[in-house]
Image: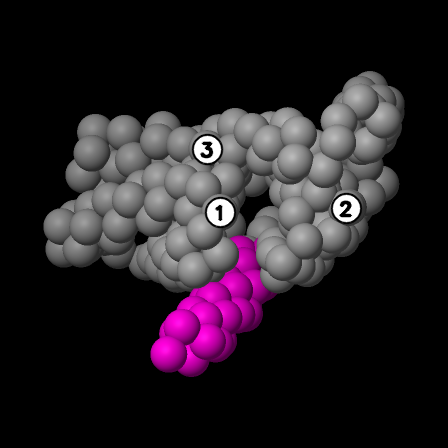
Amino acid sequence: MLTGLSSIYAVCGDAAGIAGNLFAFVLFLSPLPTFRRIIRNQSTEQFSGLPYVYALLNCLICFWYGSPFVSPGVILVATVNSIGAFFQSIYLSIFILYAERAIKLRMTGLLLAAFALFAIIVFVSMRMFDVDERQIFVGYLSVVSLISMFASPLFIIELVIKTRSVEFMPFYLSLSTFLMSLSFSLYGMFKYDPFIYVPNGIGTVLGLVQLILYYYFSSSYGEDSEEFLIDSYA
């Protein structure tokens, strides 16, 4: 009986993790309109690349947490964040290519700093902690990083309430965020991993708030804005 329940839990957990990977893929594609505009105009204009540096670092930290060296058994966390790190690296490369010289130098420095910080985290976690301590150390880092990422749309929520318009809160982006967070929250529960289900549970609540606001204010919502700023995506 216990073996059967364990098998069901394993299947449900893997299904939730795969669903989370699929919904996250949609999120990773969401900045494409912005970068099409950057490439078309051959300029970064007033867009900011900082959110992408932070997103890259977040993906790297969460990838390390999900790797077999830190947390065996949650490989789907590693897969989704490796894909995320790849996309963020591509976006940053395009941003740096078309940025003005001063911004190009600053963004290159920040990109190198992100990789350097990740290298330090890997080195410290491998050399200074045993297996259990390593998971706790990297787990707390990933929780802080994820909660900060999920909390970043709060200023958009404030803007929606203040303007009574959802123009800068695209529906499918909010829906994908909610579904991804919900999927990984369930994945963490099935894996009995609070470092996964706690931050994603918070992300689920914030995503639900965005969907409720969208429904409430949708009557005053016109056409989707042609492009939304990188700051809004972050």
Q: Residue at x 85, y 26 (%)?
A: 127
Quote the CA–CA distance across marks 2 and 1.
Answer: 16 Å
Is 156 left, or right, of 111 in this rendering?
left
Q: Which residue is mark 3?
A: 147
Residue 193's label in the rendered image is 1
**Label located before the other in sequence (2 or 1):** 2
Camera-side residue of 127 and 58: 127
Of the 4 image quadrants, the one containing the N terminus is bottom left
* Residue 61 x/y as whole percent: 68, 37
Number of marks in picture: 3
* Residue 81 x/y as whole percent: 66, 51
Residue 69's label in the rendered image is 2
Q: Residue at x 13, y 50 (%)?
A: 216
Q: Amino acid at mark 1?
A: Asp
Q: Are marks 3 and 1 in contact (CB under 8 Å)?
A: no
Residue 15 showing in the rendered view: no
**Label located before the other in sequence (3 or 2):** 2
Q: Amino acid at mark 2?
A: Phe
Camera-side residue of 81 and 40: 81
**Label located before the other in sequence (3 or 1):** 3
Q: Residues within 10 Å of mark 2 (few under 14, many from 20)?
A: some
